[in-house]
């Protein structure tokens, strides 16, 4: 039975070793891998697949030692592109070859020396350091995937040797040799896949699954052994000790497996999120109550999900709403865009809304499969939110234009009432008065009728004046915003007003500014206990900035907004503006409002 098992293991190792060596040579011929690492890997696979023979001539011993003591450092220094990185790693290979040549010249006597163990230990340590240096400093994403396959093979082979060699029989006798051959197969497969087909499967998922199994298995095995030792020390019978150990392992299984999964995920992926976690993070960001736009939230979540230094969300050409395009164009950048930047469409119901451009992490040459899955999931789930944001933006723009058109119409009606109808009615009243005076000498009843007509026209004049004043405050159109504010605020001893270069404003904007300042100053006088209130109004490129600050007691940390604050925010929102109430570091309260001018100006009725 043992002989059959050994024969099967040798045959399997021979097939995988020789077949893998040929596949690696073919891969090098097709320029998928460099020739130096291909030759080193092929020699290692061939030496692993050839069963050892004893005794061996010195020349054969030299050839058998060559793949181990020269092939491995050569593979570490040049895998997979064939370049020596760092450059000094070439001298390690040269030194290793020189040591083997000297050992062959002295009849393999160096391997029997007491100090020989220093050579493979130093060589192995330097090889690991070379792999780590190359992996972190110069390897591309594809090259790192190849290295991870090799590391996975090494890890599985190490675990197999530990598992199969628990009784100390691995490599000893027929069964032990079969176990050794079987344990070496993962290393062979990892080397073949890493060199030939690194993307045949997601290596990160395989690596994480392996780490979970090994960490959980070793952890639970350690707990089982510890409980049995403690139980034995306490004098518990062997059967009871096994029962207690099984009971403790059953209780510890879930937390140990969870901990193993968490640690393995951090080791393989660090703090990058998978697709499900990225979507959950996006959902939490969209539900958060803050001032960020939907586009800003999407960009921040995408950057955090894969730790990308550059994420940009750009509106598509098909996005015809200019306001939507201006709002969605946002980016989070700590680097520059390169050829490695990948773009993901953000589409909803067949319409391309935007494009999400994402750069790989620092030190990476491209996004990994996990990164693409996470960003793709974010793009798919962000599309409905962006479409909803666009619909809301368009509704607000339509409402702002409606309010602007309404105020412009009121301004026009007030001017017509004041400039046209008012003087016309006044002229009619004067004519009726003259007719009444002349009719006195002709007919008393006619004079009375003319006098009544004069009174009715006078009432019509007063009524038209009331209607005109009700449409808009006259002082706004006659004297401007600053005079209107002064007239509405009353005594200005506690108010410092600064209005700079506001120019001609749309009717909706100047009226909203007047109402907002009036509400803000009223709040200060009622609740702030302030000695002075500063009102500053200035025109910016595309909007009007209003700031009302006081030196009072300030807003409480948590307070429900009253009617005044709600009115301020509502008036700003109606025009597509923003209102913010904050507590400056120097104390008091600051009400900052920005009102767009362009949107309101577009609503002017010709």
Image (tube, helix red, strand yellow):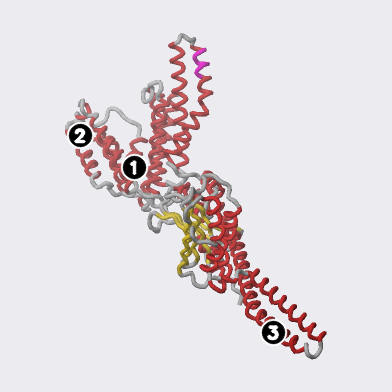
Q: Earlier in the sequence, mark 3 or mark 1?
A: 1
Residue closer to the observer: 474 or 508: 474
Q: Which residue is mark 2?
A: 104
Other-residue count near label 3 (Cα within 10 Å), few / some / many at <14 / 14–19 / ≥20: some
The percent position of residue 73, horizontal first and vertical second, equals 28, 40
The percent position of residue 62, horizontal first and vertical second, equals 24, 35
Q: Earlier in the sequence, mark 2 or mark 3?
A: 2
Select label 2 or label 1 by which is in front.
Answer: 1
Label 2 vs label 3: CA separation?
A: 132 Å
Residue at coordinates 29% horizontally, 28% vertically from top-left? 54
Q: Which residue is mark 3?
A: 430
Select label 2 or label 3 by which is in front.
Answer: 3
Select label 3 or label 1 by which is in front.
Answer: 3
Left or right, 309 with respect to 435, comes to left
Q: Quadrant of the C terminus?
A: bottom right
Q: Image height check: is 475 above or below 431?
A: above
Magenta stretch, main secondary structure class: helix
Q: Secondary structure at mark 3?
A: helix
**Residues tagged 3 and 1 counted as in contact (Cβ below 8 A):** no
Q: Image height check: is 156 above or below 544?
A: above
Other-residue count near label 1 (Cα within 10 Å), few / some / many at <14 / 14–19 / ≥20: many
Q: Secondary structure at mark 2?
A: helix
**Residues tagged 2 and 1 counted as in contact (Cβ below 8 A):** no
Can residue 443 be seen from the camera position used here? Answer: yes
Q: Secondary structure at mark 1?
A: helix
Residue at coordinates 80% horizontally, 83% vertically from top-left? 449
Based on the picture, tell me whether residue 8 belongs to the magenta stretch.
Answer: no
> Magenta residues, as a range?
240-245
The percent position of residue 446, horizontal first and vertical second, equals 81, 86
Q: Which residue is mark 1?
A: 41
Residue closer to the observer: 214 or 509: 509
């Amino acid at each position: 039975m043992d002989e059959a098992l050994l024969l099967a293991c040798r045959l399997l190792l021979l097939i995988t070793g020789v077949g893998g060596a040929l596949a690696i040579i073919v891969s090098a011929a097709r320029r998928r891998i460099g020739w130096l690492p291909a030759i080193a890997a092929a020699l290692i696979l061939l030496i692993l697949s050839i069963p050892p023979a004893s005794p061996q001539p010195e020349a054969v011993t030299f050839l058998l030692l060559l793949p181990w003591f020269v092939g491995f450092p050569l593979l570490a220094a040049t895998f997979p592109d064939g370049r020596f990185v760092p450059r000094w790693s070439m001298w390690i290979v040269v030194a290793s070859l020189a040591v083997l040549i000297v050992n062959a010249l002295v009849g393999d006597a160096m391997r029997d020396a007491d100090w020989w163990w220093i050579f493979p230990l130093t060589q192995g340590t330097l090889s690991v350091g070379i792999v780590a240096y190359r992996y972190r400093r110069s390897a591309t994403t594809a090259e790192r995937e190849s290295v991870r396959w090799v590391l996975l093979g090494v890890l599985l082979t190490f675990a197999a040797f530990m598992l199969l060699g628990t009784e100390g029989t691995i490599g000893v006798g027929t069964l032990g040799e079969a176990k050794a051959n079987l344990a070496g197969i993962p290393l062979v497969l990892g080397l073949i896949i890493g060199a030939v087909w690194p993307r045949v499967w997601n290596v990160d998922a395989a690596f994480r699954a392996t780490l979970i199994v090994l960490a959980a298995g070793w952890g639970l095995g350690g707990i089982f052994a510890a409980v049995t030792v403690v139980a034995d020390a306490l004098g518990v019978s062997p059967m009871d000790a096994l029962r207690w150990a099984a009971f403790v392992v059953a209780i510890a299984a879930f937390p140990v497996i969870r901990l193993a999964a968490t640690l393995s995920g951090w080791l393989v992926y660090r703090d990058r999120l998978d697709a499900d976690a990225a979507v959950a993070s996006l959902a939490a960001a969209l539900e958060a109550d803050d001032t960020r736009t939907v586009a800003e939230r999407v960009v921040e979540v995408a950057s955090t999900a894969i730790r990308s230094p550059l994420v940009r969300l750009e509106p598509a050409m098909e996005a015809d709403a200019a306001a939507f395009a201006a709002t969605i164009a946002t980016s989070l950048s700590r680097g520059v865009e390169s050829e490695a930047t990948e773009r993901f469409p953000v589409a909803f119901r067949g319409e391309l809304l935007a494009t999400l451009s994402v750069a790989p992490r620092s030190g990476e040459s491209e996004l990994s499969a996990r990164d693409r899955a996470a960003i793709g999931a974010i793009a798919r789930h962000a599309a409905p939110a962006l479409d909803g944001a666009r619909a809301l933006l368009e509704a607000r723009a339509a409402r702002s234009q409606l309010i602007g058109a309404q105020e412009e119409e009121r301004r026009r009606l007030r001017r017509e009432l004041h400039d046209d109808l008012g003087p016309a009615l006044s002229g009619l009243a004067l004519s009726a008065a003259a007719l009444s005076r002349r009719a006195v000498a002709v007919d008393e009843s006619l004079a009375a009728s003319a006098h009544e007509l004069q009174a009715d026209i006078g009432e019509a004049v007063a009524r038209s004046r009331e209607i005109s004043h009700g449409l808009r405050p006259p002082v706004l159109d006659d004297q401007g915003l600053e005079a209107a504010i002064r007239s509405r605020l009353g005594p200005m001893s506690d108010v410092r007003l600064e209005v700079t270069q506001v120019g001609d404003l749309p009717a909706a904007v100047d009226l909203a500014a007047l109402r907002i300042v009036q509400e803000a100053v009223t709040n200060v006088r009622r609740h702030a206990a302030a000695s002075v209130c500063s009102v500053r109004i200035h025109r910016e490129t595309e909007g009007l900035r209003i700031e009302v600050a006081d030196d009072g007691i300030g807003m409480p940390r948590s307070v429900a907004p009253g009617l005044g604050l709600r009115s301020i925010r509502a008036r700003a929102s109606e025009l597509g503006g923003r209102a913010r109430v904050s507590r400056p570091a120097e104390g008091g309260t600051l009400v900052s409002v920005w009102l767009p001018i362009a949107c309101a100006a577009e609503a002017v009725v010709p």
